[in-house]
Image (tube, rainbow, N blue to C red):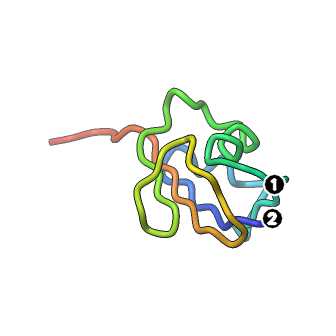
Amino acid sequence: MTVKVKLISLFAKYLEPYPDGRVDLDEPATVRTLAEYLGLPIPRVRIITVNGKQETLDSPLAHEDLVYIFPPAIGGG
């Protein structure tokens, strides 16, 4: 299956091998499967959305899902 991925902030570098943001995964797959496949530091994953709905690392993925993964917030003020 293919999912469309957006990695935010510090995570963006992990998507460089996929310039169109499309990642092919074997089924079944979860957000954790995707994050591990991309090499993301799992303890640093903070917010996940799939098709605009907040999800967890254990949420299942389906073909053509749109996944956003955010690291911890940086800065402040």
Whether the residues at callouts 1 and 2 have beta carbons within 8 Å, the answer is: yes
- Label 1 Cα neighbours within 10 Å, binned few <14 / some 14-19 / many ≥20: few
Residue holding disc 2: 1
- Which corner quadrant holds the C terminus? top left
Type of amino acid under label 2: Met
Nearest the camera: 38 or 64?
64
Whichever of callouts 1 and 2 sits on the residue coming sooner in the sequence is 2
The residue located at (72%, 44%) in the rendering is 38
Question: In this rendering, which labeled residue sits more in front, label 1 or label 2?
Answer: 1
Instruction: Say the numbered circle drawn on residue 41.
Output: none
Secondary structure under the numbered disc 2 in the rendered image = loop
How far across and how far down the image is residue 74, in percent?
A: 33, 39
x and y, in percent, of residue 50 in the image: 52, 62
> Which image quarter: residue 27?
bottom right
Where residue 22 sits: x, y (%)? 74, 66
Separation of marks 1 and 2 at Cα, in angstroms: 7 Å
Instruction: Answer few, some or many: residues within 10 Å of disc 2's Cα (few below 14, many 20 plus, some between 14 and 19).
Output: some
- Foreground pick, 45 / 10: 45
Where is residue 59 shown, x and y percent of the image?
Answer: 56, 49
Check the image and name the residue furthest to the top.
43
- Identify the residue shown where x is 65% and y is 58%: 61
Q: Is residue 14 left or right of residue 57?
A: right
Label 1 is placed on what type of residue?
Answer: Glu
Residue 27: image tag: 1
Query: What kind of element bears circle 1?
Result: loop
Image quadrant for the N terminus? bottom right
Looking at the rendering, which quadrant does residue 65 occupy? bottom right
Answer above or below: position of 16 versus 74. Answer: below
